[in-house]
Amino acid sequence: GKPVFQDQERPVNLKQIAKDIEACRRCPIGCNGTSAVAGEGPSHAPLMIVGEQPGDVEEQQGRPFVGPAGQVLRSHLEQAGIDLGDAWLTNAVKHFKFVPRGKRRLHQSPTAKEIDICRWWVESERLLVRPRLILALGASAARSLLGRTVSVQKERSRPHVLDDGTELWLTTHPSYLLRLQDDARAGEEQRFAEDLRAVAARLK
Ligand code: URA
């Protein structure tokens, strides 16, 4: 079909993106009455980290990666020696998709179509921040950057190159680590830590 953003001008700065995503109604998630969560970090960070979408806590606080999965990410970044002063943190999808369960809001994964619609915003961020390296967390972020669905487990842990020359690394989403127990958790945490260390080495 016709791209929804075909005739739209690109936002001129990151503040403009934060303002415009709040008003975005191009997919059903943007129409669910929640607040959008904008990317955060230095405007010319060498590293861009892309998650899936804001969670319950992120939507309430209006900041990316401040909930449980965000804490896992932040502690691993610190361990790997990646400074948040070098990282633009953002998401493939800018609004929180959920189903209500009593007082709780249960996370729902975005569809491929929703990711593809929201991709225009991620591209706009890339054009403004111009990171040297992008780290995509999980399958939704991988699709957002590559424009197609890939197996993260197959494609992780090595550099990919995007059309404009930007280096892309894929790894698992930290919320996946939170769902595992015991040995499985320890093994995946270790692989996640190794991926972050490899990214840290590429930033040097
Ligand atoms: N918090 C975010 O902002 N993004 C995610 O993908 C997960 C948690």
Image (cartoon, grey):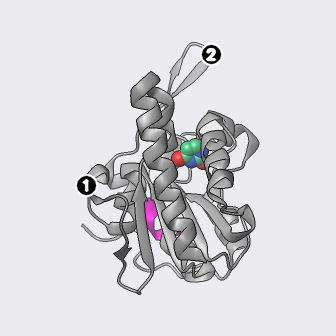
- Write down the region rendered in magenta: 117-121
With respect to residue 35, does 202 lie above or below? Answer: below
Residue found farthest to the top: 102
User: Residue, x 71% and y 63% (percent of image)?
Assistant: 83
In this figure, what is the number of numbered marks? 2
- Is 128 in the magenta? no
According to the picture, the residue beneath numbered tag 2 turns out to be 103
Classify 10 Å Cα crowding around label 1: few (below 14), some (14-19), many (20 and above): few
Q: Position of residue 154 (x, y in %)?
A: 25, 54
Residue at 70% over, 62% down? 40
The residue that mark 1 highlights is: 154
**95 versus 180 height, above or below:** below
Q: Residue at x 72, y 47 (%)?
A: 62
Q: CA distance from mark 1 to mark 2?
A: 38 Å
Would residue 21 be seen by someone viewing this image from the given angle?
Answer: yes
* Dominant SS type (magenta): helix
Q: Nearer the viewer, mark 1 or mark 2?
A: 1
Asked which secondary structure carries label 1, the reply is: helix
Whether the residues at callouts 1 and 2 have beta carbons within 8 Å, the answer is no
Label 2 C-beta lies within 8 Å of the nearest ligand 1 atom: no
Q: Can you give x and y, in whole percent of width and height, for residue 128 in the image? A: 61, 81
195 displayed left or right of 102:
left
SS state under label 2: loop
Q: Position of residue 38 (x, y in %)?
A: 66, 58
- Residue type indicated by callout 2: Lys
Front in this rendered view, residue 65 or 29 = 65
Occupied quadrant, residue 117: bottom left
Quarter of the image where the N terminus is located: bottom left
**117 relative position to 48: left or right:** left
Q: Quadrant of residue 11?
A: bottom right
Q: Residue at x 52, y 50 (%)?
A: 193
Mark 1 beta carbon near ligand 1 (under 8 Å): no
